[in-house]
Image (cartoon, coloured by chain):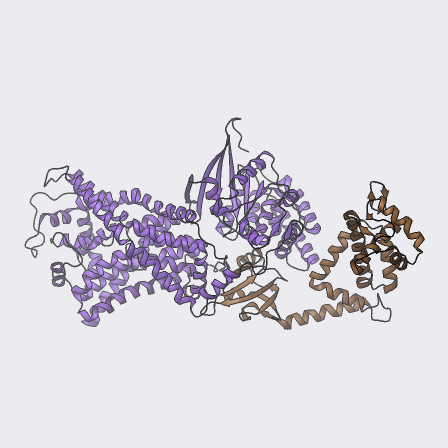
Amino acid sequence: MAAEKAVDKKIKIALAGNPNCGKTSLFNALTGTHQRVGNYPGITVEKKEGRYRDGELEVEVIDLPGTYSLSSYSPEERIARRELLRDDIDVVVVVADSTNLERNLYLLVQVMELGANPVLALNMSDEAHGGGQRLDVDLMSMLLGFPIVETVGHKGGGAKLLREAIRRAHAAPTHGERFSFGPQLERTVMRLAEKLAPQLPQPSPPPRWLAVKLLERDDELSQWLREKVSDNAAVFAEVEKEIEELEKFSRTDIILFIADNRYSFISGLLREARISEMRADSRATSDFVDSILCNRIVGLPIFFAAMYVLFWLTFTVGEWPMRWIESFFGYLGEAIGGLWPVGSESPLRSLLVDGVLAGVGGVLVFLPNIILLFFGLALMEDSGYMSRAAFLVDRFMHRFGLHGKSFVPMLTGFGCTVPGIMATRTLENERDRLTTMLVLPLMSCGARLPIYMLLIPAFFASRWQAPMLFLIYMTGIMLAVLLARLLRSTLLAGEDAPFVMELPPYRLPTLRAVAIKMGQRSWSYVRKAGTIILAISILMWVATSFPRAPERSIEREPVLAHEDDVSRDLSYSLAGRMGKLLEPLTTMMGSDYRIATAMLGAFAAKEVFVAQLGIVFSLGEADENSTTLRETLRRHYTPLQAFAMMLFLLVATPCMATVAIMRKESGSWKWALLQFFGLTTIGWLLSVAVYQIGRLVIG
Amino acid sequence: MGHHTNDGPITESLEDYLETIYELIRDKQVARVKDIAKIRGVRMASVSPAMHRLRDLGLIVYNQREFIQLTPKGEQVARKVIAHHEILRRFLRDFLHVDKKIAERDACQIEHHISDQTIDRLVRFFEFMDTCPLGNQVQEMFKNCSEVNPELPACQEECARYDAQTRLEHEQESSLLSELEPGEKGKILHIKALGALRQRLIDMGLLPQTLVEVERVAPSGDPIWLKVRGFNISLRKQEANGILVERQATA
């Protein structure tokens, strides 16, 4: 227990609850804006912490991942229970959806088994009351022995009472003493716990809980026991004997028997404390909406229409503020550039304007899109439609080793990979989520469009232009599908995580909850722009600017009669040299060092490729509509080479923002680097294959 | 256990009088001394003192020649006695198959002495026998074998035969959850799935004996949408293959 000073007490509490029980909104209600969002190290599970003050109490709140149970089958469950076992957690607030008590109290029972000090928050109590359920909360609290409060998380209702209850539970802790299994199981558990207790090292989980988990043949704890207890063989033999006895007695298997015992306790409790049950028709409205939105015939068309609206909102409405930001950075660039005399070659000026502002601005310019997209996604999630969408498209996605919930992030990837990767947070399962994130860059993002817009009209007759664009996009999709399948049978192999997914009743999302969710994700994007992307931008700038070409250099490219300084600088720079170094590799796919140099630029952001091409071909400022650039390119390359180029840019080198967000969301550099080098290798192999085979065919 | 009021215990006979008054008011709206005497098979002269006693205990409102009324406290005591009577009678007749008359008489005797806890446990026992799917069968078997009627076959044999038969029936009747059409209901018999899926299903309350209803299927026929214990979940057909159910008649 954390008790340092008498005046100022710091305590730690954890929030546990099922997914969809309104835990997050209760967390928001408790902590307000004092929140930190991050990842548990090395994995994709989100870690949320916050704090609030209650008189002299300084309360730190940990929002545990939503779980149905405390078994060890999913990373969320393992994390939740690991956190609950920490001995510095003073109070555990179990948040239960009052409209669905039987299942929600199942977690409470497990928290009691664990010997934690619980408080029960009967959340969504307004909905339960509306549905006709009446509970004798005082009686329930008396029976369980700890404080229970009714709350309405999304309206902040009951937050004050909850704080008060937490205070009471902290002052007079309980440890689940009032919970017991049925007599048969209880006796066995007690017997095992007594035998275990003297053999356990310190610190160790409570013996009673350990006994239950060993009876359940819990993997993680069996492993722990094997490592920590010397005489573990005897313990396991004992456990197996007890399991056999219990199974013989119950005529069922042990997992079911234990679950049944827990459910019996819950139904006994509710029989006493529940005055009236929910009416059978209390969810009629939600069911009616489902009969339309999830209809076998119109369900999918409605879903696609909703997606269309979402992306229209994101990319069309987002267009306006995007321009403001662009012109703001343009103005800022000029203003800063103006601090130096005209024509100044100051490296600092160049660093600030061409490096920092161009890099960070290029990322921040997407902020309006990001905010709008996350707004839409938060609406979908909080209303309950996201799980319906997953239900509708799961068959299609599952065929490729993905999950129904992968669909929206993948679709988002056509706009921009970064928010797509962030949107994978709706996927609960780690393997599903990693697979989706890893193949996401293959969804051809908006920044790649300028490249296609430049190259396709330059090399293909107008009637082939649309099919060409289609071909590129389809190639990306097909590759994503193949790669997902490959990943699921190699690196991320394993049994499919259970799809078993709850479809909570539709709820009206509150502005507050949506705003917080949107804000946190957008801020996380901005922070990336300010840190890792800033750093990479500076590196890229250094690579393209240094070392500087001497005043007079040897003309390396006699073909280019009027090579100007900029182009010479670039080819002399680190990036240019690297481009030349990489030339043997690009030659195999039909390109030369100039393309290689421009491709290095594409790492900063895909569309930079176009501008870089303009520079290496000494045409100054260039964009995707530049006809001179197109003509120059046509002189230098064949359509086959151009196609190989596009293919490479589609597949290889996800941009720096993608690498950065991948590092953040996957929790480790491992996946970010694997993605970067994996996709680059595949992209190169593919382009080389297409170019070499194409050359043979065309002759 | 007699009921205690401020003025001492209520005797068995007073409780019986209260019961009669309650029943008269319930059935005929009025309770008169004449009717009470008739039902209890005593003379009217012996009813009056009992009425006075009940009035003194604050259980009835009684003025000579007028109708008798129960005070709230009187009604409470009467109801309790009647409830006890009903529970006991049901237990004796429906579960133990005691003869009708004997059951009635024994119930009248025991009702005054039985403790609250025993009555409570009896009620729970009824509930259990009602809700447990095996409850009815156990009752049926008990009635139809030698324990109640020596001419019928021995109970042990009956039980063994039944056990074998139900197993057979289950195997025949069971279907995979994935085979149920939208709108069909089933009762879970067995969870075949293993590992994480099994744990997840159990954690979400899909245990044997749970009722499930297939609400709809996705446009491509997979996944399926279930209603269980008042909430909705979806699972893939492949996962639904791991659950054996018994089809239930749909309304």
Where residue A146 sits: x, y (%)? Answer: 61, 41
- Horizontal side, residue A96 vs residue B69: left or right: left
Q: How many marks?
A: 0
Q: Is residue A409 above or below residue B55?
A: below
Q: Nearer the viewer, residue B174 or A6?
A: A6
Q: Nearer the viewer, residue A510 or A537?
A: A510
Which image quarter: residue A196? Answer: top right
Where residue A285 sits: x, y (%)? Answer: 50, 60
- Horizontal side, residue B116 vs residue A482: left or right: right
Q: Which chain is brown?
A: B
Which image quarter: residue A599? Answer: bottom left
Q: Residue at x 48, y 50 (%)?
A: A75
Q: Residue furthest bottom?
A: B172
Where residue A687 sits: x, y (%)? Answer: 25, 62
Q: Nearer the viewer, residue A243 or A142?
A: A142
Chain A's colour? purple
Which image quarter: residue A619? Answer: bottom left
Q: Nearer the viewer, residue A64 or A255?
A: A64
Where residue A243 sits: x, y (%)? Answer: 65, 54
Q: Is residue B21 visible?
A: yes
- Horizontal side, residue A588 vs residue B145: left or right: left
Please identify the quadrant where the C terminus of chain A is shown: bottom left
Q: Is residue A480 above or below residue A365?
A: below
